[in-house]
Amino acid sequence: MESQFLESFVAVIEHGSIAEAARHLNLTAAAIGLRIRALESEFGTPLLHRAGRTVVATEAGYRVFSRANTVLREINDLRELATSPGMTGQLRLGATFSAITGLLPPILARFTHSNPQAKIFIQPAFSGALYRSVCDGDLDAAVMIEPQFEIPKTCQWHTWVEEPLILLTPSSMEVNHPHETLAVEPLIRYDRNLWGGKHADSYLRQAGIQPVERYELESLSAISLFVNEGLGVSLVPDWTGPWPEGLSLNKYLLPLDGFNRRVGLLSSKASVRTGQINALIETAKLCLPHLRPDDGSLIKRFAQTGPTPS
């Protein structure tokens, strides 16, 4: 099977017509039609049928289409391995939303300066989805929260930063002890469906705190804005900035140990972009010492708490 034939089939499905696919691939409609018929002959079943002025996939065509992009990407990877080792080809990199606005930009700026020929596709998602994408081979690597379980031997983990879990309050709020505050003040929860939110929930459980819940949000930036407006307090990681501007907040370290979250790079050992991944890791080592702390004028006070009250 010619990979160009499969590429033409994908283009027809994505563009909805043979004519549009032909324009996209700079081919004639007749050439696209011949390629589709060759595929149908090889598979022994129709892959397309007309629906008005558009062309849609048959049931068999949809099954082929669901795997076609993966097959084409792997063929392209093999071609580049054979002909162009090094920094060629596109690195498929996932990243959490906070990493995209915090850790990643300065690292990529230095990486791109040192490797101007490198090309990177960035997929934003939460850590759970990124983990699955790396394990399934859809991404070469991802900047994410470290899994709290053993990763498969096909992957490797590199810790970049440790972020302590903190109590976040309005600067005007008096806090004698974080646990007392968490027990009585309305809580703006970090979404428990996310790995970071589960981490915060584990702390509350271990501390025996039953909070007064008010909101549950998946965005750390949104949580900080809610706290700033006096809508409650929150238990969040002290994530690498930038944080939203103009906030007046206090951060309090927590009495219980063992709740730092690690953010780093999960990568696939099977990726053909090993050279780019290793270069990114080395670049991060050079950048990370300059990225934390990032409080500056944003946080008025960072207080170390005393012992848990009896």
Image (spheres, grey):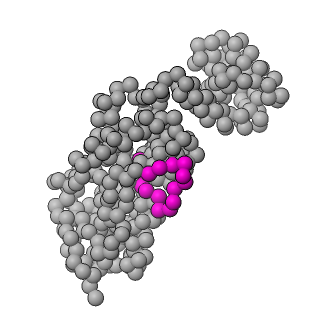
Give residue 261's position: percent from left, percent from top.
37, 61
Quarter-of-image position of residue 26: top right
Give residue 164's position: percent from left, percent from top.
31, 63
Indicate the quadrant containing the C terminus: top left, top right, bottom left or bottom right.
bottom left
Verify whether residue 297 appears in magenta.
no
Residue under the image location 72 percent in, 37 percent down: 63
- Whether residue 242 is visible, yes or no, is no
Q: Which residues are magenta?
A: 143-157
Quarter-of-image position of residue 55: top right
Indicate the quadrant containing the N terminus: top left, top right, bottom left or bottom right.
top right
Image height check: is 189 above or below 124?
A: below
Residue under the image location 69 percent in, 13 percent down: 31
Residue under the image location 74 percent in, 15 percent down: 34
Give residue 227's position: percent from left, percent from top.
29, 63
- Whether residue 251 is visible, yes or no, is yes
Q: Main secondary structure of the magenta part?
A: loop
Viewer-side residue, 8 vs 77: 77
Image height check: is 120 above or below 100?
A: above
Image height check: is 34 above or below 270?
A: above
Residue found at the very far bottom of the displayed protein: 310
Left or right for 38, reference 126: right
Viewer-side residue, 114 vs 232: 114
Give residue 103's position: percent from left, percent from top.
32, 46
